[in-house]
Image (cartoon, rainbow, N blue to C red):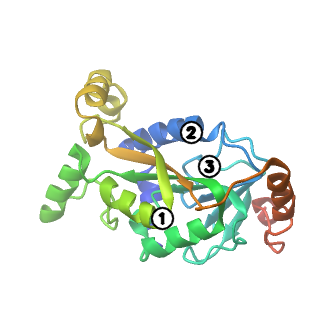
Amino acid sequence: MDSIIDFGSWLEQPAGRYIRQWEEQRFSVLTANIFGYHAVQLGLPQIRGLAANRMPFHWYSDSVAHQNEGQDQNCIALVHDMHELPFDTQSIDLVILPHVLEFADEPHQILREVERILIPEGRLIISGLNRSSLWGTRQLIGRRFGAHFLPHEGEYIRPARLKDWLKLLSLEVNQTQFGCYALPLKNEQWLQNSPLMESMGRRWWPGLGAVYMFEAIKRVRGMHLVGPVWRQQKRRRMVGLPVANRSNRDHT
């Protein structure tokens, strides 16, 4: 997972800032009305995926240590192996996965772990770079000539393929969004001032945006949540999370 650091650096470049701006806006819209107790973002602190969410406990976890970059000061930070998440089974209400799968050695294992820690009807939001886009095409051509436009370590997953993976884990895709239709250029002024391309893309080729975002719900067959029981399960989960972790404030 070390290569995701390179992607974090890329997010500070013009093309990366353009992508990050769209993603943060969409994360805010999708997470604002998801309720519960515990929300987790895995990877990429440069993207503020939980900024608009109102759950009382936010967890940020990654395979490398950061100086609370991009996250709020009350966010509890964990460092661990992405393939073995340090959370109890069925203890998390919301998981954010910004581009983690694209840089993982075992993306299927990460998804299995996410499914394990999510409560029934819990939410998962994934963002990724779309291979079936102008940006993906430029990356494919650039690879042949050694002129990469996107971080070259990434194995960018087609949206249809990712949907199949989620379906196998009973993670039902509830919403699919595509965005960022500007031409794949490194000029920040062009990227930030392409309303015509954005409008045309949303209308005429919506599935070809440079970025996609899925919201999925964990479905458990035969399970029906009843009000009082659901609240009791919530209270029990509050004491079921790791107690040996420290917030980033402990490192300052």
First in sequence, mark 1 or 2: give its number. 1
Judged from the image, the secondary structure of the residue bearing numbered disc 1 is: helix
Judge whether residue 46 can be spotted in this image: yes
**Amino acid at circle 1:** Ile
Amino acid type, residue under disc 2 in the picture: Leu
Labels 1 & 2 near each other (Cβ < 8 A): no
Q: Residue at x 44, y 61 (%)?
A: 166
Measured in 3D between alpha carbons, the distance from the residue under mark 3 to the one under mark 2, in whole angstroms, is 19 Å
Quadrant holding the C terminus: bottom right
Task: Give how far apart the Cα atoms at labels 3 and 1 are.
Answer: 14 Å
Q: Nearer the viewer, residue 250 or 245?
A: 245
**Residue under numbered circle 1:** 5
User: Mark 3 highlights which residue?
Assistant: 70
Q: Relative to 2, is 185 above or below?
A: above
Left or right: where does residue 58 sit relative to residue 216?
right
Tag 1: Cα neighbours inside 10 Å, few (<14), some, or many (≥20)? some
Viewer-side residue, 157 vs 247: 157
Query: Foreground mark, 1 or 2?
Result: 2
Instruction: Name the spot of residue 154 as percent of width and height, x first.
Output: 34, 65
Disc 3 is placed on an element classified as loop
First in sequence, mark 3 or 1: give its number.
1
Whether 174 is drawn above or below 142: the answer is: above
Residue 95 on image: x %, y %: 60, 56
Front residue of this view, candidates 87 and 216: 216
Q: Is 135 placed above or below 87 here? A: above
| Amino acid tagged 3 | Gly
**Left or right: where 26 falls relative to 201:** right
Residue with the mark numbered 2: 30
Comes first in the chain, label 3 or label 2: 2
